[in-house]
Amino acid sequence: MSRIFINYRRQDSEGHVGRLYDHLATHFPKADIFMDVEALPPGVDFVDELEHAVTACEVFLAVIGPQWLDVTDEHGVRRLDQGNDFVRIEISLALKHNKLIIPVLVGGAKMPPPDRLPEDIAALARRSAFELSHKRFMADVMQLVNAIQRALPSRSCKASTSLEVLRRKEAALRDVRDDLVNAINSPLYRYRIDNRYFPVLGEGNADAKIMFIGESPGKFEAEQGKPFVGSSGEVLEEMLATINLRRQDVYLTNLLLDRPPDNREPTEEEVAFYAPFVERIIAIVQPAVIATLGRFAMSYLLAKLDLPEKNDKISRIHGKLIKARMDYGEIHILPLYHPAIVLYSAAQRDTLRKDFQQLKLFV
Ligand code: URA
């Protein structure tokens, strides 16, 4: 029997569910996903089989699109108000059997209010929902996969090869890059276009355990669309070599994903604009440790995670591993000085080298 049950209304969300199914099938054995009553062998008692399928599942996804509440039959009667509506029967069974129910909102749908639901499924409105947006589909699906994986005892996860995981992450990062390229409302978009610069999403191993977040791309970076290819990059590569790593072993990105004029410091508006992109990158790569390079990336991340060190100065906490939690699990943050510091003060080379040794734990 399948362990993930997808409940949906065909007229409302068929396209979304097809796409969702395809993605889930790359993470879980197909036999573990029950999607269609039509998949039942001919001749079996529908309701019995549904009861079996819902009782056997461990996670019940109730996919809700914009028409979910209001779809009617040919007489204009709302489907949800009919006792033979499969969507309602399945949800009611899942509630009765105390299943983990995750409402999955698609197509911009909102969670239905309890007073618009028949009494036997009114409790659905109290389940916290998960939104699959069109724009961030890959990243959202990955978060949903994580939530399902956490809910299922471990044997359920397909032993997906690391290559599959890598391909999936690379595809998700390409989606983020497309969104970044088209982000014409960015405060740095005009400057990018006027100078024929590229946005700099990031580079490296999309499945890396170690991620670096710098400040912002410089001129060389913006000309090539790659992070850390100038003099700071040379220092960074030198430091990576001290722990036997190359730049392609880690993932490199920045707090700003476009070059600011004259390499000036990031403004609050710029940080606010690029933060959701950076957060998507983190959610996709899912590193075990994020090393921030310089005080801007450090302050942003410590504040975002609301860590006790959020107001500390970099001179106090550089090289200190800080435990934190992300949606996908436990993580460490390692504040580091920006590699450019070595270009101004050679004495700092040893400090940086020493701090980098902390990353050996994650190699
Ligand atoms: N400095 C940064 O912070 N990032 C880069 O990509 C290059 C230099």
Image (cartoon, rainbow, N blue to C red):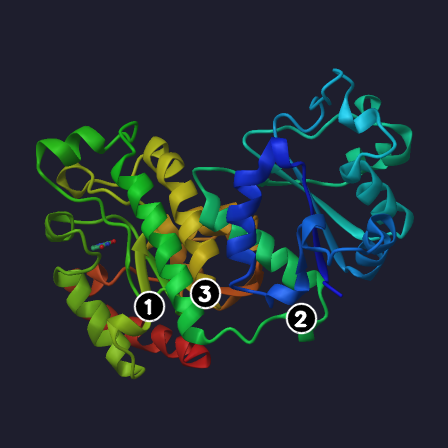
Q: Which residue is situated farthest in the front direction here?
A: 43
Residue type of the residue flagged with mark 3: Pro
Position of residue 285 in the picture relative to residue 241 (left or right): right
Q: Position of residue 155 (x, y in %)?
A: 68, 75
Q: Residues within 10 Å of mark 2 (few under 14, many from 20)?
A: some
- The residue singled out by tag 1 in the image is 205
Residue type of the residue flagged with mark 1: Asn
In the rendered structure, are the residues bearing label 3 and label 2 in contact, judged by CB atoms less than 8 Å apart? no
In the rendered structure, are the residues bearing label 1 and label 2 in contact, judged by CB atoms less than 8 Å apart? no
Point out which mark residue 171 bears. Answer: none
The alpha-carbon separation of the residues under discs 1 and 2 comes to 27 Å
- The residue singled out by tag 2 in the image is 156
Q: Which label sits in the foreground, 3 or 1?
A: 1
Q: Position of residue 194 (x, y in %)?
A: 9, 31
Q: Quadrant of the N terminus?
A: bottom right
Point out which mark residue 287 bears. Answer: 3
* Disc 1 within 8 angstroms of ligand 1 (CB): no
User: Quick one: 93 or 325, which is closer to the camera?
Assistant: 93
Residue located at (8% from left, 36% from top) = 195
Q: Quadrant of the C terminus?
A: bottom left
Residue located at (62% from left, 31% from top) = 11
Q: Does residue 76 sit above or below 16 in this rendering?
A: above
Q: Is residue 326 visible?
A: no
The alpha-carbon separation of the residues under discs 3 and 2 comes to 23 Å
Position of residue 110 in the picture relative to residue 245 (left or right): right
The alpha-carbon separation of the residues under discs 3 and 1 comes to 10 Å
